Amino acid sequence: QIRSDRDKSLSLRYSVTGPGADQPPTGIFIINPISGQLSVTKPLDREQIASFHLRAHAVDVNGNQVENPIDIVINVIDMNDNRPEFLHQVWNGTVPEGSKPGTYVMTVTAIDADDPNAQNGMLRYRILSQAPSSPSPNMFTINNETGDIITVAAGLDREKVQQYTLIIQATDMEGNPTYGLSNTATAVIAVTDVNDNPPEFTAMTFYGEVPENRVDVIVANLTVTDKDQPHTPAWNAMYRMTGGDPTGRFTILTDPNSNDGLVTVVKPIDFETNRMFVLTVAAENQVPLAKGIQHPPQSTATVSITVIDVNESPYFVPNPKLVRQEEGLMAGSMLTTFTAQDPDRYMQQTSLRYSKLSDPANWLKIDPVNGQITTTAVLDRESIYVQNNMYNATFLASDNGIPPMSGTGTLQIYLLDINDNAPQVHPKEATTCETLQPNAINITAVDPDIDPNAGPFAFELPDTPASIKRNWTIVRISGDHAQLSLRIRFLEAGIYDVPIVITDSGNPHASSTSLLKVKVCQCDLNGDCTDVDRIVGAGLGTGAIIAILLCIIILLILVLMFVVWMKRRDKERQAKQLLIDPEDDVRDNILKYDEEGGGEEDQ
């Protein structure tokens, strides 16, 4: 109630303004204008409006203000009319297995709409139940004020219990069970895996076999068990060979789905060298074991691998085989022996058989039993099949195993040059002027042989016929080149065969007489043959003359055939006319007469 001390002398009227009176929310508070008693008309909710700020006014009957307005603050006293509410109905947390007591797990939080500074809004937490209750019914505890959940007992083992479900209760009134209001939520705690279980082989010894010389073959499948969570680093197995494979012929891959170890051959194995391998294999995880956990003996196993003998290809030794031989070796001569070896020492097989696979010049043959190679033709270094003095032939060695196998070998014959080729002149034809100047002809000596059976060469003219030395002279200008020129002042235009004797530097020497066809012609001031003289003096070669004669003969034959055909055609026409009866011939004959009276006969 409000009251002015001036109400003794005046008749006053009281009123209130502000939120809750004449402002929204309106009508909550009203005042008796005569007595000044302030009343509340509706139930108040502190959680909506905790206090109201009103102003009281006093006026006379004429509405004149007789007092200054006064402030009235109305505080709504809290009542415990709200239960605690958890932020989530289900809380999820994790804790590693094997955690020590006191390990923090998670925090749950509830709120209360009541006054947090009063008991109505002060919450306390507790765990109502734990499922499952193994290995202890009280594996966890909760801080009753903060809601932090921690472990209080040891023995968390994911392989036994993977998840715990806790029912958490929050109570206001500082947890008073009689007057406080409560609510519950669920905390789901997953026990996460740690590598506390090493992989263990399902057997102490595994067996496998592999054919020799095979690679990328799986020879054994190693199986392990691991109690940790599948397809995690604590479960994924890695295999390591600790013995039995010093040359690294095997590797072990891990099957990502089954976690098995796949023993695979990565290098060829020779049965004649190793018939069996005994490998020692250790299994580990991708992450180290948890502290205090050791690998048991079951984490190590042996793998016994048997190598299977197969028929292998023979091989020549050495391959390729190099033989140095002078050319000119006659047919039927023994050249060398080229044999192969069979790596299958433990198979019952007969001796190898030899045959020729490639012999471009067909110079060689091989004995099928002992591999002795003899010549069937003269070896010639200058042959087109010889490259850089080397001739290659390939031979085949075959066994009678199951299945039959064969191997190839290459024989390289390095042919040493002998002086078996005489030098020749090049070019074979030349042109010169009929006068003494200019008339030099440059010639070159060509010898298929090589040094020292080739140049430098000696050039000379023969003594017979005497006209050669009388008309011509030759001078060597280098080891392979010489100049031929006229000795006389004038030589009639024409074609001359000039023999030239060329001798090489071999021991013994080889020489030959080569004919150089020289065309002598009339020349202009520049030393070139004139057009007419070139045509007259050029002449035709034998091939050109034969070609011209053949063309003439063919042309005559065609003309003759055409004439014969025309005659036969005329005869056929005449024969057809004779077969027609003159009386049946309805053709009219128009006759012209140059004399009066016409002709005597009608034809």
Image (spheres, rainbow, N blue to C red):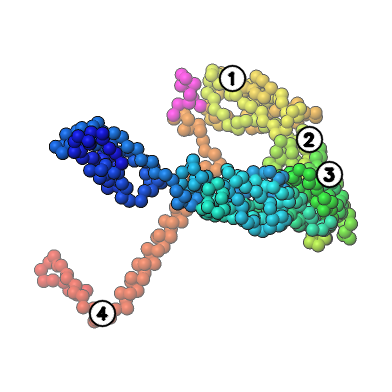
Mark 1 in CB contact with mark 4 (< 8 angstroms) = no
Q: Which residues are magenta?
A: 521-531
Q: Earlier in the sequence, mark 1 or mark 2?
A: 2
Residue topped by disc 1: 488
Residue topped by disc 2: 416
Q: Secondary structure at mark 2?
A: strand
Residue occupying the point 48% across, 24% down: 528
Residue occupying the point 23% across, 33% down: 6
Where's residue 261, x and y in %? 74, 53
Specify the amino acid type for callout 2.
Leu
Whole-number angstrom distance, CA of label 3 to CA of label 1: 91 Å
Quadrant for the N terminus, please: top left
Label 4 neighbour load within 10 Å: few <14, some 14-19, many 20+: few
Specify the amino acid type for callout 4.
Pro
Where's residue 49, x and y in %? 37, 44
Residue topped by disc 4: 582
Which numbered mark, 4 or 2, is in the foreground of this view?
Answer: 2
Q: Earlier in the sequence, mark 1 or mark 4?
A: 1
Examine the rendering and report whether any part of residue 288 can be seen.
Answer: yes
Nearest the viewer among 573 and 33 is 33
Q: Is 526 colored magenta in this rendering?
A: yes
Residue 404, disc: none
Label 1 neighbour load within 10 Å: few <14, some 14-19, many 20+: few
Specify the amino acid type for callout 1.
Ile
Residue topped by disc 3: 246
